[in-house]
Amino acid sequence: MQAPTILDEQETIIQWARTLRNNYMSVSSIIYLLVTDKLDKKKADAQTLIARQIYQGYNRGWQDSILFAIQLDAYRKEHDIQEGQIVTDGEFVGFASKFNWNERTFGLFSNKSCAKDSYIGRFTIDPFKAIRR
């Protein structure tokens, strides 16, 4: 299943949801906090209010992407590197492959075939940019 695509500013909502999940809140409860009209704003913490404000600032399609990302605990950003691209972080250069969208990591390979003997290492997606040909 493909991870949903979100905008950079929507990542705040995903991080908020992960914090709540790490504190043993269910996904359905997290989603309820985002979508309910019955939230007692006096009792809600600042992070919840920020997440709701960002969420409500988008159309239904973007809201659905956020909810899907929370459910999967995985997402892609709109400008992320992609499978097979030549990428660099300024130090390492190679072909991007074998993405893990939950951890937001990928394998870097020295050739396009992504054979075991060309494996450079596993890296976080965010510092890497595609090299334009």
Image (tube, rainbow, N blue to C red):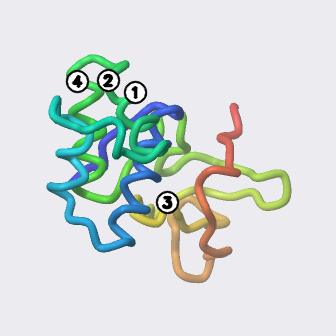
Tell me the mark number nearer the camera, choosing from 3 and 2.
2
Tell me: 91 left or right of 115.
Answer: right
- Pointers 1 and 4 in contact (CB under 8 A)? no
Q: At label 4, which amino acid type do we have?
A: Gly
Pick whichever of labels 1 and 4 is earlier in the sequence: 1
Q: Which residue is mark 3?
A: 104
- Element type where label 3 sits in the image: loop
Q: Which residue is mark 2?
A: 56
Q: Which residue is mark 1?
A: 53
* Mark pair 3, 2: CA separation: 25 Å
* Mark pair 4, 3: CA separation: 23 Å
Structural crowding at the residue carrying mark 2, measured as other residues with C-alpha within 10 Å and reported as few (<14), some (14–19) or many (≥20): some
Pick whichever of labels 4 and 2 is earlier in the sequence: 2
Q: Which residue is at a point 35% across and 56% down the rendered structure image?
A: 74
Q: At label 3, which amino acid type do we have?
A: Arg
* Mark pair 3, 1: CA separation: 25 Å
The quadrant where residue 101 appears: bottom left
* In-front residue for pair 24/40: 40
- Pointers 4 and 2 in contact (CB under 8 A)? no
* Mark pair 1, 4: CA separation: 16 Å
- Pointers 2 and 1 in contact (CB under 8 A)? yes
Residue lying at the far bottom of the rendered structure: 117
Q: Which residue is mark 4?
A: 61
Tell me the mark number nearer the camera, choosing from 4 and 3.
4
From what the image shows, is residue 39 above or below residue 124? above
* In-front residue for pair 22/107: 22
* In-front residue for pair 12/106: 12
- Element type where label 4 sits in the image: helix
Q: At label 2, which amino acid type do we have?
A: Gln
